[in-house]
Image: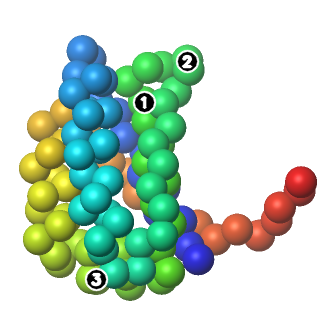
Amino acid sequence: MIWEVAAITVKAGMESEFEAGVAKAAPVFQKARGCRSLKLHRSIENSSNYRLVVGWDTVEDHMVHFRNSEGFAEWRKLVSHCFEAPPVVEHTSEVLTGF
């Protein structure tokens, strides 16, 4: 499994709307080919900063299949108006579990 980690900064005052949009989008991700999990983390120090962490079977499931789907368009429709700037996305793989 790979992890999509998206650093997202939302416009001040839109945090609740963004979180609601992500919640509405959860079923979209759940139906997506190769999508295994979705988590949203909010910064304690800066409440406008989030990390969206999505588990995918492969990078292609995210970058090819999901990004070119109606689901991706629906996801963006639900949340993109809340973005302060475009998300910064990278893909990671787990290399160690300490405990």
**Residue 12 image point, x, y percent:** 26, 17
Secondary structure under tag 3 reads helix
Label 1 packing within 10 angstroms: few (<14), some (14-19), many (20+) = some
Q: Which residue is mark 2?
A: 45
What's the residue at 50%, 81% (across, down)? 57
Give the spatial CA distance, label 3 vs label 2: 34 Å
**Residue 95 image point, x, y percent:** 77, 70
What's the residue at 48%, 62% (across, down)? 37
From this view, report whether residue 46 is shown above or below residue 78: above
Give the residue type at disc 2.
Glu
Quadrant hosting residue 33: bottom left
Q: Which residue is mark 3?
A: 64
From this view, report whether residue 74 is shown above or below residue 49: below
Secondary structure under tag 1 reads strand
Q: Are marks 1 and 3 in contact (CB under 8 Å)?
A: no
In this view of the protein, which residue sits in the foreground, 28 or 10? 28
Which numbered tag is attached to residue 49? 1
Give the residue type at disc 3.
Val
Q: Are marks 1 and 2 in contact (CB under 8 Å)?
A: yes
Ranked by sequence position, the earlier of labels 1 and 3 is 1
Ranked by sequence position, the earlier of labels 3 and 2 is 2
Quadrant hosting residue 97: bottom right
